[in-house]
Amino acid sequence: MAQLREIKKRMGAVKTIQRITKTMQMIATAKFTASLARAKNSRPYTDTIRELVAKVASQAGDASHPLLETPSGAGKELVLVISSDRGLCGAYNSNVLRTAGKLLAELRAGGREIVLDASGRKALAFFKYQKQEISAKHSVGDRPQYAAVEEIAQGYIDRFVAGEFSSVKVVYMRFISTARQRPEVMQLLPLSLPKADAAAAAGKGTVSNFEFSPSAPELLGDLLPRSVKVSLYQAFLDAVVSENVMRMVAMKAATDNAGGLSRTLKRSYNRARQARITTELTEIVAGVEALK
């Protein structure tokens, strides 16, 4: 009797968990659809800005801009790690934090001084456990706003130009497709641009001549900071999309596992109930035989 009650109690708990994971899967699916639309809508603008910068730089000859050169005397490396605020999203945070750990180890092995920034509570908790100092904590939420990301990027630009950092790197989860997300290290600063001869080779030997108004250096002065900002914004968007799709997949797997466990428990319950009925019938028959 006690075994039947225990199995029935477990069946109820598994069904409750299945309902919760199913609901979380539906929420993650809705968030993924919305975040994917935002990321897709911003991707053409991001790619166009980068292509425009490359074209202007290829025609401007030896372009010179503070965002293209490592400041002299700067020895610190700034690393921004983008994680999630919540868990239950599969290997999302572990993959990002593992990639960040490898990068930090490589930089320290090279004798570089590191300034660490973090976005997301999971990264903050991880580095706190590792007893690593966090310089700045950023929070952009599930719907990154360009104004908030622009403020972060502008702060990095100002500090980089002032010579505080030799480079700015971002560790995030890049969204490739619903079946593939990859943790990456993006060098935000200094920017690397193709040279004129490389651009000509990429254009199959044909080079278009442009007349710039205003001049190419002035255009680069506007386009380069904009490229930095939209690149960081795209990284935040990709991170949110990757988080939602991985949570959706994780909750679907949890729901399916709960369904399989529920069926297993039901079979165990039926077998235990049948065994109990058989035992009771055997005891009744034995009692009748004893009365004869």
Image (spheres, rainbow, N blue to C red):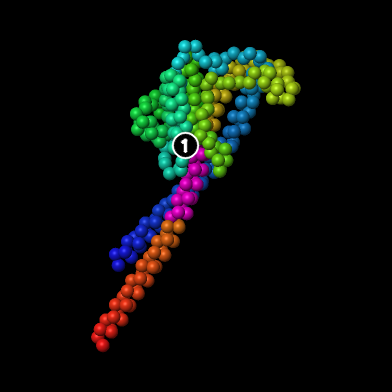
Question: Regarding mark 1 in the picture, which secondary structure is present there?
Answer: helix
What span is in magenta? 239-258
Which x, y percent locates residue 52? 64, 24
Q: Is residue 241 left or right of residue 291?
A: right
| Residue topped by disc 1 | 95
* Crowd tier of the residue under label 1, counting other residues whose Cα lies within 10 Å: few below 14, some 14–19, many 20 or above: some
Which x, y percent locates residue 180? 55, 40
For the point 49% across and 20% down, the residue is 167
For the point 38% across and 65% down, the residue is 269
Camera-side residue: 10 or 241? 10
Which x, y percent locates residue 277? 34, 74
Camera-side residue: 171 or 119? 171
For the point 49% across and 11% down, the residue is 72
Q: Answer yes or no: is residue 214 visible.
A: no
Is residue 191 placed above or below 290 in the rendered structure?
above
- Three-letter amino acid code of the residue under disc 1: Asn
Q: Quadrant of the N terminus?
A: bottom left
Chief SS of the magenta region? helix
Which x, y percent locates residue 95? 47, 36
In reply to whether residue 244 is colored magenta, the answer given is yes
For the point 42% across and 61% down, the residue is 264
In reply to whether residue 2 is colored magenta, the answer given is no
Is residue 273 placed above or below 84 in the rendered structure?
below
Q: Residue 68 occupies which quadrant of the picture?
A: top right
Q: Answer yes or no: is residue 116 visible.
A: yes
